[in-house]
Image (cartoon, coloured by chain):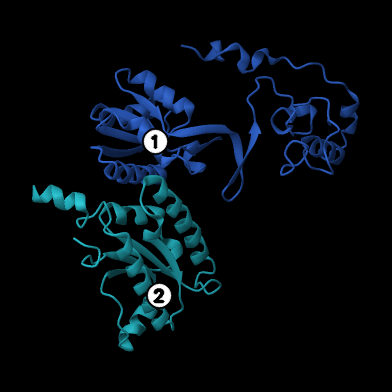
Chain colours: A blue, B cyan
Amino acid sequence: MIVAERKKIPELLNIVRAHKKVLVLGCGTCVTVCLAGGEREVGIISSALRIASRLQGLDLTVEELTIERQCDNVFIEQAADAIERNDAVLSLGCGAGVQAIAERYRNKPVYAGLDTTFIGILEEQGVWTEKCAACGSCVLHEYGGICPVTRCAKRMLNGPCGGSCEDRCEVRPDVPCAWQLIYTRLKEIGQLDRLRKIAPPKNWNRSLDGGQRIVVRQDHRI
Amino acid sequence: MKNDEFEPKILAFCCHYCAYAAADLAGTMRIQYPPNVRIVRTPCTGRLETEYFLKAFENGADGVLVAGCLEGGCHFTNGNLYARKRVDSMRQMLEEMGLEKERLRMVNVSASMARPLADLILDMVETVRKLGPSPLGKNSRKHRLETAS
């Protein structure tokens, strides 16, 4: 899922301070699960904005709404009336949600209320970790299901770097060395011989460097 | 209005198993505590959502007191520990908003601690009295100027 964090209240207030009526729009999917932009967070952030704006003498009305998914037209339509009666939208969706709303309501300012952080998983209650960098050409099958692109600080495809200490990363001692994890995992599944192969330079053309990526499925187009 | 004339309005969320019983016991024992608190009984402080604290301030409370069981003594094992974390995080958020974090406080008492609870309430009332009226409430200077004009 996509993991995000809320922006601080002073920053949010600065973003919306030019407007009198703002819709705080939550999303019921990924950002609900990572406790950043779901119905509950919409309530908290809206209350906080009302309090902060009154303390600063601003005339700000905040409306709350959460839709099931901000990146899907069917659900976005459900917010049409609320978006129409407000001056601006503070979206608590991920970056995709914010842009999806902005593209469909062209006369409304749409602002991001969250910092979209990464694609990851819930590691334990209250802790999320990054697992995928969406690099566009997955190499997980070569590395025992542990991603060196995301989890090695140096993104080494032929590791380890030599700087790891015990099983800790040289760059960030609070995280395990990805290459130690890869070695252990490959050993467990009897595929250590994969490490004898030198990985060629990765094709980064499919990553973010070439601008926006588009996937087209001709067989599904109508 | 001078601060010494100001009577703070404090909302106290009291756990059914400890603080609420302690407040009840204080009544039975004829222990006086300031009438500034409005008590809301909650099944456990762990039941409290952070929104409740914000709503209380939004609606003009000068202070919010969360009174749970002693640490290690929660009827539901960990509810008061969760509440402590939520209160701490909301205190940070109050500062972000520009409101004094001292207006929100968590205390821990057992059902038999009627006297300590009365003292904790008194301390909270005096803390909030020193801070002055909440800028969001009807006692705030801004509100009084607006209604006077």
Along the viewing direction, whichever of A194 and A10 lies nearer the viewer? A10
Residue B135 location (% of width, % of height)? 26, 52
Height in image: A184 above or below A153?
below
Residue A181 location (% of width, % of height)? 79, 39
Q: Of the residues tagged 2 and 1, which is closer to the observer?
A: 1
Label 1 sits on a secondary structure element that is: helix
- Residue B16 is marked as none
For the point 23% across and 55% down, the residue is B137
Drawn side of residue A99 relative to residue A144, left or right: left
Q: Amino acid at mark 1?
A: Leu
Residue wearing tag 2: B19
Drawn side of residue A11 relative to residue A81, left or right: right
For the point 35% across and 45% down, the residue is A48
- Residue A12 is marked as 1
Height in image: B23 above or below B43?
below
Q: Residue furthest bottom?
A: B29
Residue B82 location (% of width, % of height)? 51, 60
Chain letter of the residue carrying label 1 = A
